[in-house]
């Protein structure tokens, strides 16, 4: 069963993503997907861009561009390459928690 076919898999869109961060479209979806993997402080996201794209119903190229924009804006951090036990490698990302903390505690971001 493909990742996008699992009925228990989802992402959550929070109001701060659209209102405070100004995200919309593909960037909103990708950010929500990354955040869904980074629920604890040490959490990281290392799903392949292809699998992310498949789950979100977008092209791999759209996903790659979105990851680049989100990194450039400081919303997510590119940790580097992660090599899995299976031998494949993917990029590892983390949500910039300082941005979320500033928003939740009434501070400004950006």
Image: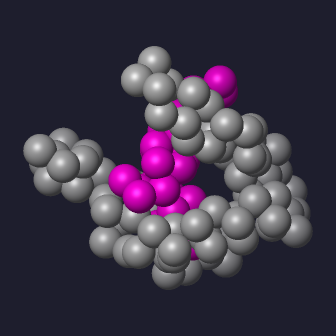
Q: Residue at x 62, y 43 (%)?
A: 91
Does 43 appear above or below 17?
above
Quadrant of residue 75 within the rendered picture: bottom right
Q: Nearer the viewer, residue 38 or 84?
A: 84
Was residue 36 drawn as part of the magenta stretch in this picture? yes
**Image x and y of residue 25, in percent:** 50, 81
Q: Which quadrant would the C terminus be assigned to in this image? A: bottom right
Q: Which quadrant would the N terminus be assigned to in this image? A: top left
**Image x and y of residue 93, in percent:** 65, 43
Is residue 16 at all visible to an observer of this figure?
no
Q: Nearer the viewer, residue 38 or 54?
A: 54
Quadrant of residue 65 within the rendered picture: bottom right
Q: Residue at x 30, y 51 (%)?
A: 10
* Residue numbers of the magenta segment: 27-52
Q: How many marks?
A: 0
Farthest front residue? Answer: 87
Was residue 73 drawn as part of the magenta stretch in this picture? no
72 left or right, relative to 32 = right
């Amino acid at each position: 069963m493909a990742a996008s076919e699992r009925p228990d898999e989802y992402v959550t869109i929070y109001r701060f993503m659209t209102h405070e961060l100004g995200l919309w479209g593909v960037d909103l979806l990708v950010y929500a997907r990354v955040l869904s993997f980074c629920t604890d402080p040490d959490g990281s996201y290392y799903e392949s861009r292809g699998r992310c794209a498949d789950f979100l119903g977008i092209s791999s190229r759209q996903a790659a561009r979105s990851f680049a924009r989100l990194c450039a804006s400081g919303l997510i951090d590119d940790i580097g390459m992660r090599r899995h036990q299976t031998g494949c490698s993917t990029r590892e990302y983390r949500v910039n928690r300082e941005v979320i903390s500033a928003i939740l505690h009434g501070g400004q971001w950006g």
